[in-house]
Amino acid sequence: MIETGKQLEISSIREEMKEFREKTDAFYAGEMDKGAYKSFSGRFGSYAQKGGQASMLRLRMPAGRVTKEKLKFIADAIASHQVKRAHFTTCQTIQLHDLSGEDAYEIMSAALDAGIITLGGGGDFPRNVMCSPLSGVEQGEYFNTLPWAEAAGEYLMTFIHAQKMPRKLKVAFSNSPKNITHATYRDLGFAARPDGKFDVYSAGGLGNNPRLGVLVAEAVEPSDILYYIKAMWLTFLAYGNYESRAKARTRYMQEALGGPEAYAKAYREKLAEVYASGEDLKLSVTETPLTKRGDGSTAEGFRVIPQKQEGLYSVLYHPIGGQPPITWFASIYGLIQDMQDVELRLSPDETIYIINLTGAEAQAVLKATEGGAETLFETSVSCIGGTTCQVGPRDSQGLLAACIKAVREAELPADALPQIHISGCTSSCGTHQTGAIGFNGTVKMIDKVAHPAFFLHVNGREGQADACIGTQLGAILETDIPSFLVELGRTVAESGLSFFAWRDANPGKLEELAGKYIG
């Protein structure tokens, strides 16, 4: 029986960080090229930004949970190192940007004392385990999956030193049919059921060669989830593609083994081996009940969500592009530090929720989080973008800002456009294949001249029962995208319907309108 709380020894992590410091110094001294440094530094959750003059650092937040202690650390680190920029990611982590090599090392080291580990935040390692952000407080959830997600995250850290891993291993837990963590199309996903058990999906993923996950098990007891994680690793060891780095992801095993059914059979064989080995991977977790109750005060609004606990609320805050003002961390900590049981939860759409608030506390938090998204469209998702990322060719953040500006100027109804998803490249950091409308960066040739453009994807869905990867239609010039969205919004507004009602009532109309811009 495995108790929660088991992790890599902090002392061993500190020992590994000595090499990070040495090679980071060598990189900034010009003694190590960017390719070699990238393949090394990702292991520590850090990469050099475009141009090689600054670094980013990814702070893992298991299950998206940000306690007051972790929030205070981040606020203090920002102040002491004069950090200028932060980003909420679609894998429920917090990235700090524009750091010197020394800043990256010192924040990484100090973070360990606050219970924040960056090791494995990038590279060929288990990534941050994801969980529905309102687990434990959401009305209508099947059950609270947070304790199980946190336990899975701790167990996966023991694979950091495994000899062979997929090129990223993303594990997710969902607590309801909304499936906002995309558990049904991750490398390994645990989707909650009404009976308090999990259905397990495997070998899914976004980006190149996207695949929905294969349903490999149903009605799994939560206490058994580590057996399924171990089986995932063994399956990749046996059948994963180690010859091609581009194909070293679990989703490629579906095709390599002859299809979803053949993959499911192979996975179940490895699962049987794990059980037969006699290794005790049974989990025991203790869920601390929330004792706080409402005090009779109330709150309401677009950003206020009543919790399942009577009289308590969560407040949604979505900074545009997932980039809050850098002073936000200190100000929100100062506000909530004395509020009972209040904490933060990161969401896969770059939203952050402040939870367990009384009505009066929610009103105060609403005021402290003004300036972010006020409509569904303004909660749109963007990766950090090509001005920062070494890989991405397109400025996804700049495109999002231009689109929001154009939509605001057009004064469209709040429900005329959906949340959109933008990635600067073919990678899925902006989850462009999951949304009703998504874009990923490319170029469009006009008269043999390459122009900045984005591929348009439509009709993606993330629901547990009807998940669907968006259809790629074609490339639109970057400069035309704001006009396309405004025309779409006006068309929807003229119908008197919301975007989703309009789309469902007019099949093919979205594609028809887009065709004018794709050319």
Image (cartoon, helix red, strand yellow):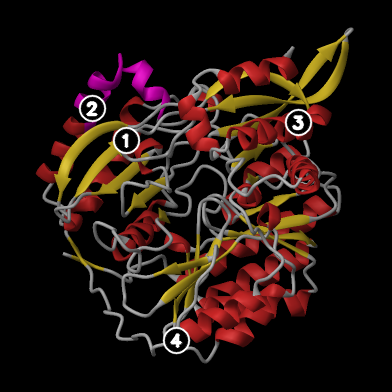
Q: Label 1 belongs to which residue?
A: 202
Q: Residue at x 31, y 70 (%)?
A: 308
Task: Give the mark, 1 or 4, whose residue is nearer the N terminus.
Answer: 1
Task: Find residue 256 and name its label.
Answer: none
Where's the C terminus, which quadrant? top right
Task: Give the mark, 2 or 1, whose residue is nearer the N terminus.
Answer: 1
Disc 3 residue type? Ile
The answer to whether one can see residue 425 in this image is: no
Disc 2 residue type? Ala
Q: Residue furthest top?
A: 447
* Residue 260 falls within the magenta-colored stretch: yes
Q: How far separated are the C-alphas under marks 2 and 3? A: 41 Å
Disc 1 residue type? Ser
Q: How far separated are the C-alphas under marks 1 and 4? A: 44 Å
Q: Secondary structure at mark 1?
A: strand
Q: Label 4 belongs to which residue?
A: 297
Task: Give the mark, 3 or 4, whose residue is nearer the N terminus.
Answer: 4
Q: Secondary structure at mark 3?
A: helix
Q: Relative to residue 226, is residue 332 depicted above or below?
A: below
Q: How far separated are the C-alphas under marks 2 and 1? A: 8 Å
Write down the region rendered in magenta.
251-267
Please name which of the two marks, 3 or 1, marks the residue nearer to the observer: 3
Q: Residue at x 54, y 67 (%)?
A: 301
Q: Label 3 belongs to which residue?
A: 481
Q: Label 2 belongs to which residue?
A: 264
Q: Marks 1 and 2: in contact by CB < 8 Å?
A: yes
Q: Relative to residue 51, is residue 299 depicted above or below?
A: below
